[in-house]
Amino acid sequence: MKKFLFTIFVVLNLLSVKSNELKFEKILERMDSITNAPKDQKMFITITLIDKNNVQSIRKITMYQKGWDKRAGKFTYPNEQKGLGFLSLPGNVMHIYLPAYKKIKNITTQSKNGSFSGTDFTYEDMEMSSFSKDYTGKILNENDSLFLIEIYPKKEKNSFYEKLQLTVDKRFYIPIKIEFFEKGKCTKILERRKIEKIKDYYVAKEMVMKNIENKHQTIMQYDSIFFDTNLSDDIFTDRFLKE
Amino acid sequence: MKKFFLILIILLGVLTIFASDISGKIENDFRLFVFEKNIFMDKFYVDMEYKKNFNEKFDFNLCLQIESDYPFFIKNIEDMTEKENFYKNLFKIYEAKIFLKKFPFDFVDLTLGKTFYNLGKGFVVSPSDIVNSDDLSDPLRMDKKVTNFMVLLESYFKFFDLNIIYTPFFTPSILPDGYIDFKDYMGNLNIKDSIILPENIFQNSDFFVEFLKDINNFQTSFFYGYSRTKTPLPSNIKLEMVTPFSGFGDVKFNFPRISSFGLGFSGAFGDFSLWSDFVGNFLNENRFKIDLTEIGRGVVDTFFAKEKIFFNFLLGFDFNISGKYYFMTQYVHGIRGTYGEENLNDYLFFNSRISFLNEKIFVEPFNFAYEIVDWKEIKSQGGILFNPKITLNLMDDFSIGFSFFYIKGTSGSYFKKIEKLSCFELTTKVFF
C-alpha cells in the first residue's frame, strides 16, 4: 500500500511539474503573441536620459518593426546624431549606418552590450527577440493578477544577461517589470507603464529603464504609433539606412 | 571679413526661414603648436545641411561649408591695412545633390550632383576610397574628402548589389602647405613648375563599378576603377644651365591614368569586428623625362615608380568590452596620395576609448599611429604620431575636446614632414 501511495505521489508530482512547464511555455507564447501581434509598427519615440543629478537629455527616433524579427530605426534628434541608423534582422544580425562616412558597420556580439546612444538600453535590448524561442525558464510565483517568472537566454541568443525576472500582468500578458541579472546581481530594472489599447493591440506607451549601479535612468515614450500599415520589406535593408 | 559676415548673415537668414529642414555644426579648432614659428591656429568651420524631401522618391540635399581661420599673413604695415590678411575665409558648396529613389527602375536609386562616395571598408582612411580626392590641407584630419560631381547608380538585385559611378570632371587633391620643396631635389637650380590637367571630357572622366554581396552578416565587395592619380606626378623636367653651377628648371606635372581592382570585406566574428581592403593599381605611366637638350645632351628616362603595378591593403579589427571600453587596430600599406611600391610606407593605427557617465565623457588615452619606412630598419627608421584625447559631451548638441598631437619621424617618413604640427588642440562643437 505504501508503495502504491508513493507511486501516486511521484506521478502527481511529475504531472504537476509537467503542467507547470506547459503553463510556463503558454505564458511565454501568450506574451509573444501580444508583444508581436501587430503585423508591423511605425513608431515615433522620444527617449529622455536622466542622470543621478536629474540632468536630462533627449533623443528622438523613428522606428519601424515588422513581425517579431525585423526592426529598423533612424535618429532624428539630437542633430549630432541625425541620420544615424540601425537595422536588426533575424540571426543576430545588426547593422548601423554612419552618415559622416556613408558607411555601414556590422555590430559584434560584444558591442550589443554597449549603450544604445548613451541610454540605459543596450543594442541587445533594442534587438528583436521572442520569449518562447530565445528563452527557457520557470514560474517563480503567481497571484490573482500577476505571474512572477524567471527566464534564461538560450546559448544561440548570445545574450549578456544571465537571467531576467519578469512580472507579467495577467490582464494583458505584458511584462510590466523586467529585472536584468548579470553575474548574480540585478543591474537594471525596466518598468512598462501607461498600457493602452490602440487598434486591437495592447501597448505600454512608456518604458522606464533604471540602472541600479549608476542611478541613471532612461524613459522611452511613444509619441505616436501606427499599426499594420503594410510596411514594405525595403525598409529593413541597408538601402533604407543609406537614404 | 565683410564677406564672411555677409555670408553668415545670409546663412542665418536661410536658417530662420527653413529652420526645420536645416541642421549642421559649428566647430572651432584651436591649436597651440609646440615647434611651429606661428605658434597658434584658430579655425572656425560652419557646416550647414539643408534636406528637402519632395516626396518619398525625391530628395534634395545641400551642404554648405564656411571655413574661417586666423593665420598671420602680416609682414609689413601695408599688410595690416588689409582685413583679408587677418581673417582668411572660404565658402564652399560641399554637397549639392538630388536623390531619386526607384528611378528609372524599382531596383535602382539614382544620385546626381556634387557629393562623395567611399568604396572602402576601412575605418576613417582606406586606400580603396579613390572615387573622391583627398583634402590633404590639414594633415591632422585624415578623413576629409574633396567632393565632385558624380552620377551614382545604385542597383539592388536579388543576389547582389551593383553600383556604377561616373565622375565627368577631374578634381585633384588639395595639397598641404610645403607639399614639395624643389631645393631638396634640385639644389641651386631655379625651378618653376606647371600642372598639365586633363583637357577634354574623355580625359576628365573617371568610371567605377562595384559589386556588393552580403553573406551571413559579412559584407563583401569587388570594384574596378578607371581614374587618375589624385596628386600630381612629374612627367618632364627641362633643364637650362646658365653657369656650370646654376640654371633654370621647368618641371611639368600631370595626373596619369590608373586602373584599380579592389576587394573588400567587413563583418562581425563573435566579439570582433573585422574589415579589410585590398587594391591592385596599374599606372599608365611610371616614368618621367629629363630634357637636357638645352645643354647639349639628350632626353633621359627615369622613374618615379619602378613598376607600373603596386598594391595597397588594409586590415583592421575592433573590440568592445562591456560597452565601455573600445579598442581598434588598423594596419595600412600606403597612405593617401602616394603612388608606386617603393614610395609606400606601412602604418599601424591604434585607438582606445573609454566612456564614462553614460557617454558624457570619452577618454582616448592610447591613440597612436606608427609608421614603418623599412621593415629591416624598423627600430631606426619610421615615425610616430601620439594623440591622447578627452571629449566632454556636456549637453545635447555641444561638446568640448582636448587633445595633444606629438609627431616625430625619421627621414623618408611621412610623419617627418608633418612633425612641426605637434600641438595641443582644443575643439568645441555645437550642433544645430
Image (spheres, coloured by chain):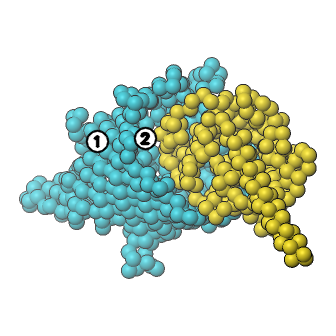
Q: Residue at x 64, y 24 (%)?
A: B19
Res B77 quadrant in image: top right
Q: Which residue is mark 1?
A: B206
Q: Colour of chain A?
A: yellow
The percent position of residue B42, horizontal first and vertical second, equals 60, 46
Kindly state the secondary structure of the residue where label 2 is placed: loop
Q: Residue at x 33, y 55 (%)?
A: B262
The percent position of residue B81, horizontal first and vertical second, equals 55, 33
Closer to the camera in the image, A62 or B208: A62
Q: Residues within 10 Å of mark 1 (few under 14, many from 20)?
A: many
Kindly state the secondary structure of the residue where label 1 is placed: strand
Which kind of residue does numbered mark 2 sit on? Answer: Phe
Q: Gap in Å between the C-alphas at discs 2 and 1?
A: 13 Å
Q: Residue at x 34, y 47 (%)?
A: B210
In the image, is residue B348 above or below residue A69?
A: below
The percent position of residue B280, horizontal first and vertical second, equals 29, 59
Which of the chains is cyan?
B
Closer to the camera in the image, A26 or A117: A26
Mark identifier at residue A97: none
